Image: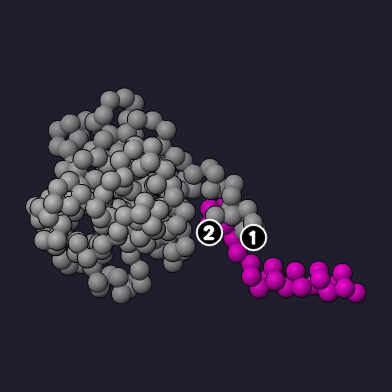
Amino acid sequence: MLRTLSLLGRETARIVLHAACVVCERELPWRARIASCCAACWSALPAIASPKCASCALPIPEGDRCIECMRDPIPVGWTEAWGHYRGALERVLHAFKYERHDFFAAPLAELVETTLRARGDVAFDAIVPVPMHRTKLRRRGYNQAELLARALARRLDVRCDAALLAKRGETPAQSKLARAARSANVRHAFAASPRVAELSILLVDDVSTTGATIRACAGELLRAGAARVCAAVVAKTD
């Protein structure tokens, strides 16, 4: 009888508390998981193993700059990215950004931390997330870049100050624009606080595609007097 009741209890809990891995969609085990991703899918996230462009973090066969950044580098000391924006990592970041899986902030920040520690450069005065305009923030409920930045700040023991950079107005989503239109879309879209003067800033976002957002944000921070700006993202598109 007790065994039967125990089995019924476990089955009821499975039905009521059922959760699926955001990547493979199989039932999510309670132990072998990272947030809402099973351990197997998490271990399969595509990390960047090749050299990366120091300016935009694009994976490249060799050297320290991609062809585009040789011509027009992003105004940062460097940009780092942990993984390729594809496969399991693309799915995890989509859930983090659009499906309210905000609990991915801590494990994703841990991935970014490993990349920064390997680089050996974590001496920053402040960590600043790529901002979201308040209209969009009200609509979505959270800024995934800020959640990531705050989690990373705790790991690096550096203050996170989202007030150092603001979005002037709501612009079309970068992901919905053609590559050539992205720079124009975010040009003059951000405003930096004068409090950034003389500070070493780490700019944080979830994904970098063309680098246009990082370029626009870094440019504003430097114009406001920041001593240097570097950038870190979870994933870079190839």
* Mark 2 crowdedness (10 Å alpha carbons): few <14, some 14-19, many ≥20: many
Instruction: Specify the segment rendered in magenta.
Output: 1-24
Residue 181 point in image, percent of width and height:
18, 51
Question: For residue 15: magenta?
Answer: yes
Q: Nearer the viewer, residue 210 or 132?
A: 132
Residue 141 point in image, percent of width and height:
36, 72
Q: Nearer the viewer, residue 136 or 55?
A: 55
Report the Cα–Cα distance between label 1 and label 2: 10 Å
Residue 165, quarter of picture: bottom left
On screen, residue 158 versus residue 92, left or right, reads left
Residue 131, quarter of picture: bottom left
Q: Which residue is mark 1?
A: 30
Quadrant location, the C terminus: top left
Mark with earlier residue (1, 2): 1
Residue 28 point in image, percent of width and height:
62, 58
Instruction: Give the answer, above or below, for where 218 lies relative to 143.
Output: above
Secondary structure category for the residue under label 1: loop
Secondary structure category for the residue under label 2: loop
Q: Which residue is mark 2?
A: 35
The residue lying at 13 percent from left, 51 percent from top is: 198
